[in-house]
Image (spheres, rainbow, N blue to C red):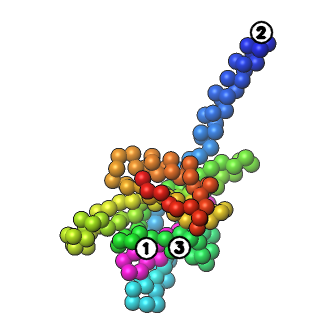
């Protein structure tokens, strides 16, 4: 009986010591970009094609912006060609939006071999609301946190969080941590919170 109690207690202690370690396997790294200052711009060829920008990122991945018709797309990849072929390179909002500068939150995971890799990003976009359209002064007051999954498995939007709501950053992190790695680009639909 003593051996059973000891084994049960040991099991609880080992479980308690493992749980915090597992929760510490995911963390954030932050990088910033500014299309005018820190990115390389390639001009577009058409009137409403504003071009594309290659910006420094993290973990061997760059941030790629493209814009046209007052809307933007953001993708991530090791080079522009790879990033431009991802689903994220064509994802945007129906209304006018912009993200010419910002801070990327890279959600990182520690792998069994001790290395780390980014598996998702969180980026705040400026989005045009219905009230903005009615006012028609060119200002966008909407703020949306876009959660994007990263390779392997594709680069695409996992979901959207209204950044004006309380605890929006926590909601975006939760979405990234719980959904990004299993999200199937081109199959699963992004969720809105």
Q: Percent position (x, y) of residue 127? A: 35, 66
Q: Element at badge 1?
A: strand
Residue at image point 59% right, 46% down: 26
Residue at image point 44% right, 56% down: 192
Marks 3/2: CA–CA distance: 62 Å
Marks 1/3: CA–CA distance: 9 Å
Image height of 182 relative to 55, above or below: above
Q: Percent position (x, y) of residue 151? A: 64, 63
Image height of 88 relative to 52, above or below: above
Instruction: Tell me which numbered mark, 1 or 3, is placed earlier along the sequence.
Output: 1
Residue underneath mark 1: 72
Q: Is residue 9 visible?
A: yes
Point out the stretch of residues depicted in magenta: 58-75
Q: Is residue 62 visible?
A: no
Q: Percent position (x, y) of residue 172? A: 46, 51
Find residue 170 and name its label.
none
């Amino acid at each position: 009986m003593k051996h059973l109690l000891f084994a049960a207690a040991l099991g609880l202690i080992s479980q308690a010591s493992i749980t915090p370690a597992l929760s510490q396997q995911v963390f954030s790294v932050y990088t910033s970009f500014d299309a005018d200052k820190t990115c390389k711009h390639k001009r577009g060829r058409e009137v409403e094609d504003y071009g594309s920008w290659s910006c420094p990122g993290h973990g061997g991945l760059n941030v790629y912006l493209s814009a046209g018709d007052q809307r933007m797309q953001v993708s991530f990849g090791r080079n522009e060609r790879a990033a431009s072929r991802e689903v994220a390179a064509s994802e945007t909002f129906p209304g006018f939006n912009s993200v010419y500068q910002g801070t990327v939150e890279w959600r990182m995971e520690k792998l069994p071999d001790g290395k780390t890799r980014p598996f998702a990003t969180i980026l705040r976009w400026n989005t045009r609301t219905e009230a903005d359209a009615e006012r028609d002064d060119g200002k966008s007051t909407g703020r949306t946190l876009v959660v994007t999954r990263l390779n392997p498995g594709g680069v695409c939007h996992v979901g959207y969080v209204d950044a004006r709501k309380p605890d929006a950053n926590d909601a975006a992190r939760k979405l990234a941590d719980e959904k990004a790695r299993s999200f199937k680009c081109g199959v699963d639909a992004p969720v809105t919170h």
